[in-house]
Image: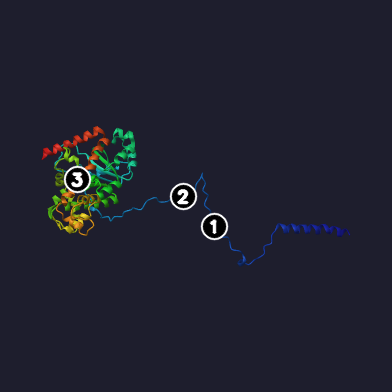
Amino acid sequence: MLAARSTRPRARLHVVRRALRAYATETVQSADVSSLPPPPLSTPPSAPKRTRLSPAPRPAASHRHQPLINLPPSFGRNQLLPVSDSRRALLESIVADFEAPIRYAYAYGSGVFEQDGYQRATGEKEPMLDFIFAVTHPSHFHSINMNQHPGHYAFHARILGSDFVTRVQNIAPGVWFNAFVPMKGVTIKYGVTAVDNLCSDLLNWNSLYLAGRMHKPIRIIKDDARVRLTQQVNLTSALRAALLVLPAEFTETRLFEAIAGISYAGDPRMLLPAENRNKVANIVRKQAPQFKELYHRLVVALPGTNWSAGSTTIQQDVSPTARALHLKKLPSSLLARVKSHYAGTPGLNEGETAYWQKLAGDERLSHAIVDELKHIVRGPATLQTLKGIVSGGPSTSFRYASEKVGKWWKGRQQE
């Protein structure tokens, strides 16, 4: 009996130990691998949420616009006239000194290409260098430039600010000039205009104030595809206008003088002792090689013209049909004036097929073209002369006029 009682606690202890062992261990049964579920697919880490305090970085987006005009590299190469290395370096350094954005820039005048009648004496200072800057936003340009170069502007212009300067600039022909500016050891004058205004004048001859200057040799410092394209149209238009006032055969010198004289026809300064009366001839005599580079390829490309490579004589077809081709492609402003000039002429009806041939065959056409060119130039040139008093002030305007008269008198003495 005592032996039976002693074995019961042992049995209970054994059961408890087995139960504890069962809870403490897990029995792993073998299973078929193919029956196991596939592992979960790996998912990329989610991007952190954007918050106002710590925004996640945005992907870089390009804001560069595709160019509107893609020109062949050789297009308009006739416009790229060479100058000496020292002169080129000087012109480029002057333009590079401006922090305000400039899309197109060129230098022109006797300070860039030599002109007859303006020979410098030994030790005499260089003539003032003339520039034109075409910008996208004139008010923005003047604001930055006025901050960088306040001395370039007259006192009243600095006080009234860039908005005033831009409003004055926008008055026809759309240019603001700063004159007698010392830079890089020389004195410069630069005009600021909008690119849209420049291209419009090159295409349509609204004022010929800018387009006329660019009929003559210029040195391009900053190029722009749009301006180069419209300048090529401008040069071709000048050539067509000159051919319409020239006979069947003429010399290259006569052609160059006809083209150079377009911007001086009607200019009020030519009526005053402020410009040399022989200015056109003086320009052509010294710059004939540059004129030939500008226009020779254009003449050869036009139908009805002949200009041999080694010849100084040019022939053209002066039949009404050939002249009509030039006439119809004149810039819109000049063409509209010519048509208005002939309005009401008996036997001329714009609606009839032979209108252009009749107009081109009229013997008075050359005189009509010259008269209308004078009308286009006179108004804007007069306004720009008056604007010079506003932009530069009385003292600068008087100094500029005095130097012009001095150059005119010196030119007369050298004749």
Looking at the image, is 99 positioned above or below residue 395?
A: below
Cα–Cα gap, marks 2 and 1: 22 Å
Q: Amino acid at mark 1?
A: Thr
**From mark 1 to mark 3, how far is it between C-alphas?**
79 Å
Please name the residue shown 27% across and 47% down the image.
198
Q: Secondary structure at mark 2?
A: loop
What count of labels does the image hold? 3
Q: Residue at x 73, y 59 (%)?
A: 22
Q: Is residue 167 visible?
A: yes
Image quarter of residue 113: top left
Image coords of residue 330 (percent x, y)? 22, 53
Residue placed most toward the observer, 217 or 386: 386
Depth check, mark 2 against mark 1: the one in front is: 2
* Relative depth, front residue between 407 and 393: 393
Provide the secondary structure element on which disc 1 rests. loop
Residue 374, numbered circle: 3
User: Which is nearer the N-term, disc 1 or disc 3?
Assistant: 1
Q: Which mark is residue 58?
A: 2
Residue located 74% across and 57% down the image: 20
Name the spot of residue 399 as percent of width and height, x first. Answer: 21, 34
Q: Position of residue 230 (x, y in %)?
A: 26, 51
Q: Is residue 253 left or right of residue 335?
A: left
Q: Is residue 71 positioned above or below 193 on the image?
A: below
Judging depth in this view, the residue of 321 and 115 nearest the camera is 321
Split into 4 quadrants, where in the image is the C terminus? top left
Q: Quadrant of the N terminus?
A: bottom right
User: Residue beneath label 1, please?
Assistant: 43
- Is the Cβ of the residue at disc 1 closer than 8 Å to that at disc 3? no
Task: Tell me the number on the disc at residue 372.
Answer: none
Q: CA distance from mark 3 to mark 2?
A: 59 Å
Nearest to viewer (mark 3 / mark 2): 3
The image quadrant that residue 169 belongs to is top left
